[in-house]
Image (cartoon, helix red, strand yellow):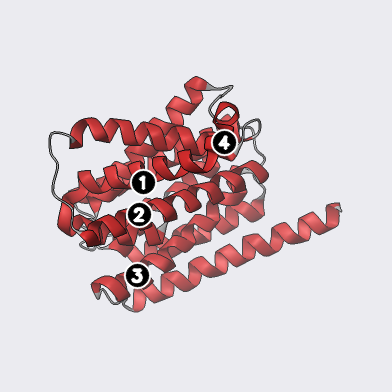
Amino acid sequence: FASMDAVAKYLMKEIGPAQTIWARYTAQAVLVTLLIFPRINTYGKTKYPKLQLFRSVALMMATTLFFFSFSRLDLAEATALFNISPVLITLGAFLFLREKIGPKRVIGIGVSLIGALIIIRPGSGVFTIYALLPIGGAICYSAYNLATRFVGLDESPWTSLLYSALFGAVCFSMYIVFHWRPMSTTAIILTIIIGLIGTAGHLFLIKALTLGEASLVAPFGYTSLLFATMWGIILFHNFPDFWTISGAIVIVGAGVYVWARERIVTSMKT
């Protein structure tokens, strides 16, 4: 996802945020449809039409708010603010999915949040009115994760992938048809790359939420900060400072801690 966001930020320079979001969903919709076409009658049916609509709307809103935040915030800053989502996902999993949250997960999430706060440093220039965009995106993304976890227990990941991609593609196509910007060869190539990365990322996420509880999967979302920082250096020459590096170390440590504890618990059960 961090790689997709970096390519999107780069693409926005040529075609703007709205058409970039259209490119992201349309490329994914075309790719997923081609991949599942032989079994479209199977994967095109859902037991949860209302929930699929809800998660599709939530994902589209999350993508829209997050991508528009790139125009005002650095990639790492926007990602750091977006990464309040693991806390929201864990809380939502407890309230709505009745998942049990042990002290080890709470510690891991809390430490990861501290790492994110170290990076964004409350009181710094990151907290402007534009900071509300990735925060709003995080709320929508959390709702998407919880709905995906619920439907993923009974449906194929390809079904969920198809519905969310088609919904975003159709909605933004209705807007872009009146606000089209010519696309260069480079922009078309980047659109294809976004489609490939977005499809793979969401397929992995949906599969992860099918196999594991949302509160377990959520803390690993903090690792996107590391990759966002890396792409910020490579593509946009935004070099991390001492606080960014320190926060990244804390986040990685928390993720490794949660992963190690879950492995111990799993081995004890088996």
**Which label lies toward us, 3 or 1?**
1
Q: Is residue 26 above or below residue 253?
A: above
Looking at the picture, how far across and down is residue 144, in whole percent?
A: 46, 37
Q: Mark 1 or mark 2, which is nearer the start of the sequence? A: 1
**Which label lies toward us, 3 or 4?**
4
For disc 1, the marked residue is: 27
How crowded pointer 4 is (Cα within 10 Å; few <14, some 14-19, many 20+) is rated as few
For disc 3, the marked residue is: 231
Circle 3/circle 2 CB separation < 8 Å: no
Residue 192's disc number? 2
Looking at the picture, how far across and down is residue 167, in whole percent?
A: 37, 31
Identified by mark 4, the residue type is Pro
Residue 116 vs residue 25, the one in the foreground: 25
- Which quadrant of the view contains residue 14? bottom left
- Which quadrant of the view contains residue 138? top left
How crowded pointer 2 is (Cα within 10 Å; few <14, some 14-19, many 20+) is rated as some
Looking at the picture, how far across and down is residue 222, in whole percent?
A: 47, 59
Element type where label 3 sits in the image: helix
Residue 124's disc number? none
Answer left or right for 92 relative to 104: left
Answer whether residue 3 is visible to the viewer in this image.
yes
